[in-house]
Structures are given as structure tokens and as C-alpha cells.
Image (tube, grey):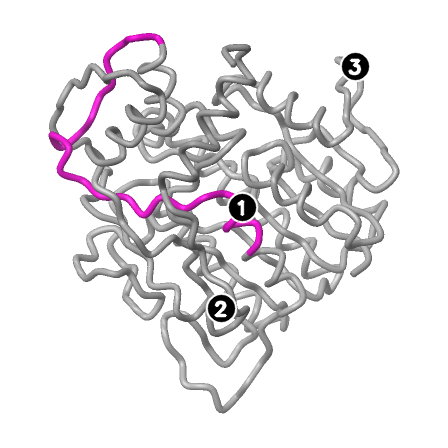
């Protein structure tokens, strides 16, 4: 590999991925706008771990094998500036406005970042004829699908949040670029990623913080929900193995929701082991050594009852599937949380 671009470089998955692939490429370039959806201090701390010390007036940083640009992917001129300086062999597009519930409050952010921003990056990938365009989709695209485990062969025509709809749009746009321009694209449907350096808006972080501070946690649908919690190390291991395996065009291939004759594919990346939310809370209680104050609430708009990944396609392709037990993953997160917040 030569040059690799990672968008969302200061984000949870982007940060871990860059740490994983350091030294495996000629140059890694990262893009992130460091927005305030959650505390930018955490994003800056991740960048510091990657060797980037931010200076308020600076937007470009260069280290021995990692260059970082603080730009917004919705700004086509700023994106053009980055691409004018590098020819990227692989682009891993993780930047997005995340969160199902926030999409009910600020829908425009999802249109701007997840659709316009996605277009700006994939259009440049097409122009540079990059060998593999990998992008983040989401398990939320399965929407009202009631069959479990979720398979990439299932229909994803009934999203129930704008976030899910924007990710479904990414998959449609990617297929069009693969078909028209022979751009190899791989969409990754992530399932509830957690682990050290995780996002403060996610249940793992929120519940840990509340239990340690002896404050109530909100558990929706009265706890009758299951999530396929997937440890971040398993996510980045999967991505790193996929980098050198772009899909290819095959006019004889049978078309399905997951593949087509074009160099296009989508894959689930999940732990294929759903955990009930109340069981999840009890694991945290045992690890932290404190009981949670639980506030049981109705199901929220946009939420699904169960997520459960069928990862057979991923396993067949790269010889790996996520497998970290929830107890181990949560222990690692709690240890990191206490250390990061000076509670160890």
C-alpha cells in the first residue's frame, strides 16, 4: 500500500484504525472537522495519541507517517485541497454525523455530512481511480426488518430514522459509482461498536459514567432490547484485512442486495451475539462494583428492538469474525474510562 486516506480520523473507529495500520503504508492522511456533537477534547486526546498536538490557528499537521487536516468534508474546496496534495490508493471513509436520536433533532446535519460529504469524498475517489473505497454504513439500515440474524442478503428498504436513510443512501451512491466508473467499493454495516476511547453518546460510556457518579441511567423499552455489541479491536481488525481485498467486476455474478456485477459489496461487522440491555447493565455493575440506578422508559422513536449480525460473508472473505466476549470488552472500557478521567 502507498497512501491511505482515513476520514473521521479523530473519531472512535478512525483513531483505532490508524493505530492499527501505522507502519503498513507509505503515508496515512487523516481528515476530521472536530465538531462539537460530543466533547472535542476527547477527539483531541485521540489525536495526541497519534502524535498530533493541535494548535488553535493550525489546520494542517505532519508527522513521520501521519498527516492530519482539520477540515469539513462538506466543504468541497477544502476536500479538493487535500486531494491535490496526494494520490490515494485506498480511501476509508468513516466521517459522518452519527446517532439515531440526534437525527430527530437536527436532520440537516445528516443531509450535509452523510450525503453531501459522502459525495465529495467518493467523487474524488473516482477522479483519482483509487483501488478500494471503503465506507461506514450501519446496522440501522435494517430498519423494520424482523428476521434475525440480519443478513446482507436481506432487503433494507424500510429505514426508521434519517440516520439510517442517509446510510442506505451511501450504499446506493456507492453502487452507482461502482457500476458507472468501475470504482471498487465496500460498505461496512457496523453493529454497536464499543471499547476504550469510545463515544460519550453511546450506552457504554453513558452508563459507566452514571454508575460511577451514582446517577440514574435511562433504559428504553423497559429493558426489552438486545444489541450486538461489537468490540472496536474486532472492527479495525476486520477493516485492516479488507483493505487489500477490493471487490471486482463479474458479469456472470448473480445480483443480490449485497453484491452485483459491479465491483461492489456490503458486509456486516458485528459480534453475532446479541446481549439484552439489562444483562449489559449487570455486567457493568459487576465490573464497576456498584449498583446502577435504573430508570425504565418506553421505546424511543427510531430505535429497533434487536440487532444481530450474520457475518458469514465477512468470515468467508477475510478468515476472521468479531469474537470478543462482552465481559472482556466492558472490562477494558471501564479500565480505560477510569484512567482517562483520573479515577484509577
Residue 330: x, y in percent?
40, 34
Residue under pointer 2? 265
The structure residue drawn at horizontal position 71% and vertical position 48%, both measured from the top left corner, is 5
Observer-side mark, 3 or 2, equals: 2
In which quadrant is the N terminus drawn?
bottom right
* Magenta residue check for 222: yes
Task: Give the mark, 2 or 1, whose residue is nearer the N terminus.
Answer: 1
In the picture, measured across the screen, residue 223 lies left or right of residue 333, that is left
Residue 25's spot in the image, x, y percent? 79, 54
Marks 3 & 2, CB-CB < 8 Å contact: no
Helix, strand or loop under label 2: strand
In the picture of the structure, the residue carrying the numbered disc 3 is 57
Q: Quadrant of residue 309?
A: bottom left
> Which of the two labelled residues, at mark 3 and mark 2, occupies the earlier sequence position?
3
Circle 1: element type: helix
Magenta stretch, residue numbers: 213-237
Q: Mark 3 or mark 1: which comes first in sequence?
A: 3
The answer for how far apart the CA atoms under marks 3 and 1 are is 33 Å
Which residue is drawn at the image coordinates 65% and 21% (left, top)? 44
Report the residue at 79% width, 49% height from top. 23
Amino acid at each position: 500500500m502507498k497512501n491511505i486516506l482515513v476520514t473521521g480520523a479523530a473519531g472512535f473507529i478512525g483513531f483505532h484504525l490508524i493505530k492499527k495500520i501505522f507502519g503498513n503504508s507509505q503515508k496515512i492522511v487523516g481528515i476530521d472537522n472536530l465538531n462539537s456533537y460530543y466533547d472535542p477534547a476527547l477527539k483531541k486526546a485521540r489525536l495526541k495519541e497519534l502524535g498530533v498536538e493541535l494548535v488553535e490557528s493550525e489546520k494542517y499537521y505532519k508527522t513521520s507517517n501521519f498527516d492530519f487536516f482539520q477540515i469539513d468534508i462538506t466543504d468541497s474546496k477544502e476536500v479538493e485541497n487535500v486531494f491535490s496534495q496526494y494520490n490515494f490508493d485506498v480511501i476509508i471513509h468513516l466521517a459522518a454525523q452519527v446517532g439515531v436520536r440526534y437525527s430527530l433533532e437536527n436532520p440537516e446535519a445528516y443531509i450535509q455530512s452523510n450525503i453531501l460529504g459522502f459525495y465529495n469524498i467518493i467523487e474524488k475517489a473516482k477522479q483519482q481511480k483509487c483501488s478500494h473505497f471503503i465506507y461506514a454504513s450501519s446496522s440501522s439500515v435494517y430498519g423494520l426488518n424482523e428476521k434475525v440474524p440480519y443478513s446482507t442478503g436481506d432487503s433494507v428498504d424500510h429505514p426508521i430514522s434519517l440516520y439510517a436513510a442517509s446510510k442506505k443512501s451511501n450504499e446506493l451512491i456507492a453502487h452507482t459509482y461502482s457500476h458507472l466508473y468501475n470504482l471498487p467499493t465496500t460498505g461496512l454495516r457496523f453493529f454497536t461498536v464499543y471499547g476504550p476511547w469510545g463515544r460519550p453518546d453511546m450506552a457504554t460510556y453513558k452508563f459507566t459514567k452514571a454508575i460511577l457518579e451514582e446517577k440514574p441511567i435511562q433504559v428504553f423499552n423497559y429493558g426489552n432490547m438486545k444489541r450486538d455489541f461489537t468490540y472496536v479491536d474486532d472492527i479495525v481488525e476486520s477493516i485492516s484485512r479488507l483493505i487489500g481485498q477490493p471487490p471486482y467486476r463479474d458479469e456472470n455474478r448473480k445480483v443480490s442486495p449485497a453484491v452485483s456485477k459491479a465491483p461492489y459489496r456490503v458486509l456486516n461487522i458485528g459480534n453475532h451475539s446479541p446481549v439484552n440491555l439489562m444483562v449489559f447493565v449487570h455486567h457493568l455493575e459487576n465490573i464497576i462494583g456498584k449498583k446502577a440506578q435504573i430508570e425504565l422508559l418506553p421505546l424511543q422513536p427510531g430505535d429497533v428492538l434487536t440487532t444481530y449480525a450474520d457475518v458469514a460473508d465477512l468470515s468467508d472473505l477475510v478468515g476472521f469474525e468479531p469474537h470478543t466476549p462482552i465481559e472482556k470488552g466492558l472490562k477494558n472500557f471501564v479500565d480505560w474510562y477510569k484512567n482517562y478521567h483520573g479515577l484509577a
